[in-house]
Image (tube, helix red, strand yellow):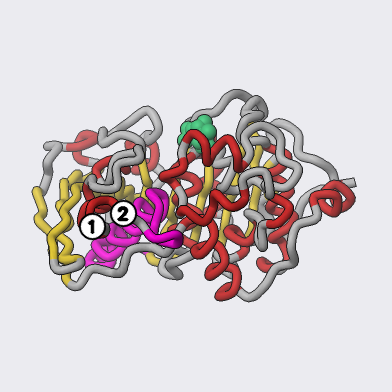
Amino acid sequence: MVKKLLEERNVPKLLSRHEMLNILLEEEYGYLPPEPEKISWKVEENCILNFCAGKATADKVTAVCGINGKEFSFPFYVCIPTCEGKHPFFIHINFRDCVPDRYMPTEELIDHGFAVLSFCYEDITKDNNDFTDGLAGVLYHNGVRRPNDAGKIAMWAWAAQRVMDYAQTLDTVLDFQRSVVCGHSRLGKTALLTAATDTRFQFAYSNDSGCSGAAITRGKQGERVQVICGAFPFWFCENYKKYIGAEEKMPFDQHYLVAAIAPRKVLIGSASEDLWADPVSEFLCCVASGSAFGGFVYEGRLPEIGDKFFEGNIGYHLREGLHYFSREDWQRLIEFVNSK
Ligand code: GCU
C-alpha cells in the first residue's frame, strides 16, 4: 500500500549525491555563501553563572567572519556538560536566542549527556524579503540576487556550518561521531540543507519541516510550492518560482534533500495534526530516500501516532498533536542518536 502511494507521486529517481545537491542548490535553495576567508571567535565565558547548578557551562560566543572582503559577526550559545568525557552535541538552529527556550529544553539535554550549541536564525539575516540585511547585505550589492544565489534558508545553513567550525575547536570535549544539526519547521528545512551540504554533520533532525523540507511535494496536502513561494519567496532562490503550478516539472523532489545526507543519519519527526506540513508526505520522503541509506525500515503501512521507525540510518517518528518542537520530539531524537 505504501509503495503504491509513493508510485502515484511519480517522484524522480535518486541520483548521485553530487548531482542531487547541484539540482537542489540551482533550482530551489540557491548556492550557499562561500566559506569565510577568515574566522575568529570572541568568547564570553560563563555568561550564565552556575548554569543548571553547575552541571553545565554556558558561554556566549561571537563568530567574526571575513567574507567578500567585509566583516560579518553573529552570536551563539555553547552549553556543555561539566562531567567528564566527550559529549555528543546538537547544533540547534533556533527561532529565539534564549537559553533555555521553549523549543530547547537545555537542562534535559545536558542531563542526557548532550552539549548544545544554538543560535537565533534572525541574527544571521532577517526572516523577510530584505536582502540588504545582515549576512545578505554582505553578500549582495543593494540586495540584488541572481537566479541561483542563496535564499535565506541557505544563509541560515551557512551559519550552522560556522557554528560547526567553532565546535571543531572543542575536540577534547565533543564527540564528532554524534554531531547533530536540528531545527523545527522552516529551521527543519534549514537543518536538512545544512547536513546535505556539509559532511561534518553525522546526524540531521527535521521536526515538522513540511513543504520544501522533508515532505514529498508532488501530491502533497497542505502547503504547496505556489503557497510557499507566495508567502516566503525569500527563503529560496529565484529559480524556485519556475515551479509554481508546475511541480510535476521539477527535476527533483524533497527526497533528494534527505538522500543527499546519506550515508550519514537522518531522523524525520512529524506531528499528527500538522496537516499543513503533511505527515504522510514526510513519511513517504523516508520511503523514497530509503535506498540511499541502505533501506528505510518500517512496518509496510502508513505511520500511526507513537510510531518510531529507528532501525535504519533513516528514521521517522510521529507524535500526537500540533506543529511544535516539543520535549517529546527531543526525547525521540536523543533515543535515535543513542541507538546508533
Ligand atoms: C509557515 C510555512 C511553513 C513553515 C512554518 C514554520 O507555516 O508555511 O512552510 O515550515 O511557517 O516555519 O513555522
Q: Position of residue 79 (x, y in %)?
A: 25, 46
Judged by its main secondary structure, the magenta piece is helix
Asked whether 243 or 63 is in front, the reply is 243
Relative height, residue 261 to residue 304 (above, below) = below
- Image point 51% across, 49% down: which residue? 205
Q: Position of residue 47 (x, y in %)?
A: 12, 41
Q: Which residue is mark 2?
A: 144
Q: Position of residue 111 (x, y in %)?
A: 37, 41
* Quadrant of residue 180 within the rendered picture: bottom left
Q: Amino acid at mark 1?
A: His
Within 10 Å of disc 1 (Cα), the crowding (few <14, some 14-19, many 20+) is: few
Q: Is residue 152 magenta?
A: yes
Q: Amino acid at mark 2?
A: Val
Q: Position of residue 16 (x, y in %)?
A: 63, 75
Asked whether 60 or 58 is in front, the reply is 60
- Image point 73% across, 57% down: which residue? 288
- Image point 60% across, 43% down: which residue? 225
Query: Is the residue under label 2 in contact with that under label 1 (CB below 8 Å)?
Result: yes
Q: Which residues are drawn in magenta?
A: 146-175
* Quadrant of residue 110 within the rendered picture: top left
- Look at the numbered disc 1 and say if its residue's Cβ is closer than 8 Å to ligand 1: no
Residue 213 lies left or right of residue 99; in this view the side is right
Q: Which residue is mark 1?
A: 141
Relative height, residue 262 to residue 239 (above, below) = below
Q: Secondary structure at mark 2?
A: loop
From mark 1 to mark 2, how far is it between C-alphas? 6 Å
Residue 54 lies left or right of residue 184; in this view the side is left
Residue 102 lies left or right of residue 237; in this view the side is left
Can see residue 77? no
Can see residue 18? yes
Q: Secondary structure at mark 1?
A: helix
Count of labels in the image:
2
